[in-house]
Each structure stands twice: as structure tokens, then as C-alpha cells.
Image: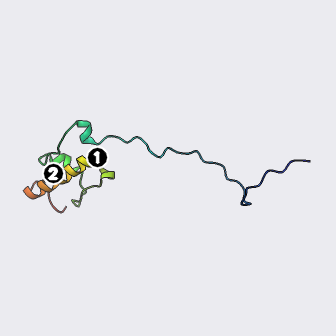
């Protein structure tokens, strides 16, 4: 006689096990860390425009890929550029 397969304790058919993924993956460095800049310059409008949407909103850290220090520095630089009139407040 053939042996029966052992049943799952809940009585349901057992699911195939998934391969576990590593929870933490290596992230790419922030663009300002790669260039080794300490502070983001408010006069560099090309770099600041890449960090804002068409409407003038700033991208989040996750979307822009900046580290925390450079994201704060970018926020300050965008505010200064807006105040001086180099960048618009609204798109």
C-alpha cells in the first residue's frame, strides 16, 4: 500500500515555500554625496530644477534619492532661490 502524505496541521494543502528576500538592499548614493559637495548652492538652478516638479513642489527624499543632510540643504537652497527670484514659487 502507498503511504499517505502527511497533512498540514490546518488541514489545507501546503503551499510551496517562497525564497526569502533580503530586507535591506544596497542603495545608490545621493548625487551630492557622489560629487562630495557639503552644501547645495542656491545659485545652481539646473540642479534645483531637477529636484522640483513642474508645479514647483519639491520631490521627496525617496523620489529624489538624496540623503537626509543633502535633502535639508536642498530645501534651504530652493527657499533661498525662490526668495531672491531665481526660481518660481508656483509652476
Crowd band around label 2 with a 10 angstrom C-alpha radius: few (<14), some (14–19), many (20+) = many
Residue at the front extreme, as displayed: 9
Closer to the camera in the image, 83 or 91:
83
User: Given the current orientation, which residue lies at the most extreme bottom position?
Assistant: 90
Q: Residue at x 15, y 56 (%)?
A: 79
Residue 62 locus on image (x, y percent): 33, 52
Q: Is residue 14 left or right of residue 3?
A: left
Question: Pointer 1 and pointer 2: residues touching (CB < 8 Å)?
Answer: no
Question: Which residue was labeled with disc 1?
Answer: 67
Residue occupying the point 20% across, 54% down = 75
x 35%, y 40%: residue:
28
Q: How is the image coloured?
A: rainbow
Name the N-terminal-most of marks 1 and 2. Answer: 1
* Numbered circle sitting on residue 77: 2
Q: Quadrant of the C terminus?
A: bottom left
Q: Residue at x 29, y 55 (%)?
A: 60
Residue 80 position, x and y percent, is 11, 54
**Mark 1 or mark 2, which is nearer to you?**
1
Residue 4: mark? none
* Image location of residue 65, percent across then percent down: 31, 47
Report helix, strand or loop for mark 1: loop
Instruction: State the separation of the CA atoms marked 1 and 2.
Output: 15 Å
- Nearest the viewer among 53 and 5 is 5
Report x, y in % for residue 72: 22, 51
Side of 19 relative to 36 (left or right): right
Quadrant hosting residue 40: top left
- Farthest left residue in view: 84
Task: Say if 83 sits above or below 41 in the image.
Answer: below
Rate crowding at label 1 as few (under 14), some (14 to 19) or many (20 or more) other CA atoms within 10 Å. some
Number of marks drawn: 2
Q: Is residue 62 left or right of residue 14?
A: left
| Label 2: element kind | helix
Amino acid at each position: 500500500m502507498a503511504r499517505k502524505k502527511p497533512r498540514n496541521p490546518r488541514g489545507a494543502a501546503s503551499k510551496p515555500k517562497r525564497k526569502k528576500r533580503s530586507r535591506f538592499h544596497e542603495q545608490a548614493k545621493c548625487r551630492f554625496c557622489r560629487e562630495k559637495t557639503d552644501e547645495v548652492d542656491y545659485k545652481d538652478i539646473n540642479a534645483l530644477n531637477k529636484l522640483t516638479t513642474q508645479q514647483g513642489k519639491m520631490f521627496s527624499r525617496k523620489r529624489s534619492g538624496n540623503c537626509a543632510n543633502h535633502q535639508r540643504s536642498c530645501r534651504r537652497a530652493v527657499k533661498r532661490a525662490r526668495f531672491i527670484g531665481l526660481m518660481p514659487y508656483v509652476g
